[in-house]
Amino acid sequence: MRTPTFAVALAALVAALPAAAGAQQNLYPQAAFVGGVEARQYSFGEKFAVDKLRQVAFPMGVIVPVGRRFSFDVGTNYAITTVVRPDSAGGSDSFSSFTDTQIRASYVLGTDAVVASVLVNLPTGKQTTTLSQFNVASSASSTFLLFPVNSYGSGTSVTPGIAAATSAGNWNLGLAASLRFSGEYEPFSDSASNSVKYQPGVETRIRAGADRLVGQSRLSLGFTFSTFSNDELRGGGFGSGAYDPGNRFIVDAGLQSPLAGGIVSVYAWNYHRAAGAAGDSAGSSIGNKENVFTFGVSGAFPLGTRMSLEPLAETRIWTPEDGSGYLVGLGSGLRIDLSPSVAFVPGLRVDFGSIKDAAGVSNSITGWGLTGFLRYGF
């Protein structure tokens, strides 16, 4: 029920600040619209509970610089998620809706070494659904699988944040922090049409980043820590209670180097979620501990003055509290600059791997993804 979009945005701020320091300029060089389509499907072995999971999403967003210091961006998605059951169970279920809309305002302070921002999550997504629809929508919320939308609606929230950067010798150092305050919302109604109310706790997020030149290459390092106050669930036939969702840790590293007239990036990151605990006196574990490790290589190689090839190879290893899984992905994008203001990027990706449940039963996974993104600067 929690989305990581602000973490990505804030990490981008930290990465951008060192380069901007000392030259008063906006975070965005020009206004732009970004939109497109992203389709992804996973097929599972015959022993798995479902046959296929599929999602088609239509992201859309606008970024607008205002003057030399202020900027804002707005983004949302329309997504269709489908669960296809094995022939023995029969049938399929789909859920479609707009997601919440996120609006962020950023302001560059002083000599560009500090950026303050506020992100507001507007509940334009369909928050209250039937339990069946909720189960379909939440099937795409896995941190292991790569669905473009993992949450349709999570109520109103406000996230103020601040990021700062400085130089220390050959290193650029950045630090960012944010707090997310969320309102209560109704994720679904139970079989008796009783509304279930969910109150997320306050999220505190801190990210540290560093980068430097190593010869002709650029090395970047990062660490993110998130902690939460207790979430609360009440109403319907599920009873009421509070629980600690568990702290999260992300460590990431990347090396970007010139090669054969293009650029090659080697990256790795590890996401760890500590076990959450029920709000009872015993503080018993709720079994949501997990770890995801990803290692990959990507590139960008010019094929002419207006076109470049962007290949990707990636391995992902998942270790939940029970069971395990891995995915190997291969793909490529093709960036086409249609004009100085318009770029189109189609892409294709295939994945294969395996997932093992708590009983040790393994199931194969095969997946594919198709993307097409258009960026128009104005």
Image (cartoon, helix red, strand yellow):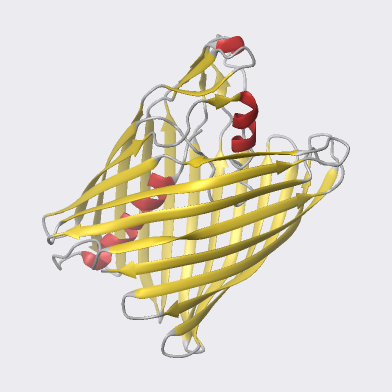
Q: Residue at x 56, y 22 (%)?
A: 277
Q: Residue at x 61, y 49 (%)?
A: 55
Q: Residue at x 58, y 14 (%)?
A: 193
Q: Is residue 346 left or right of residue 103?
A: right
Is 230 located above or below residue 71 in the figure?
Answer: above
Is 41 located above or below residue 181 in the figure?
Answer: below
Residue 157 in the image: x percent, y percent?
34, 32
Residue 147 in the image: x percent, y percent?
59, 50
Q: Is residue 75 left or right of residue 334?
A: left
Residue 297 in the image: x percent, y percent?
57, 70
Is 366 located above or below residue 213 in the figure?
Answer: above
Residue 168 in the image: x percent, y percent?
26, 63
The C terminus sits in image quarter: bottom left
Of residues 53 and 124, the one nearer the viewer is 124
Q: Residue at x 53, y 52 (%)?
A: 57
Of residues 158 and 296, the one nearer the viewer is 158
Of residues 271 and 67, the one nearer the viewer is 67
Question: In the figure, residue 275 lies in which quadrant?
Answer: top right
Q: Is residue 231 left or right of residue 75?
A: right
Is 64 located above or below residue 157 in the figure?
Answer: below
Question: In the figure, residue 129 lies in which quadrant?
Answer: top right
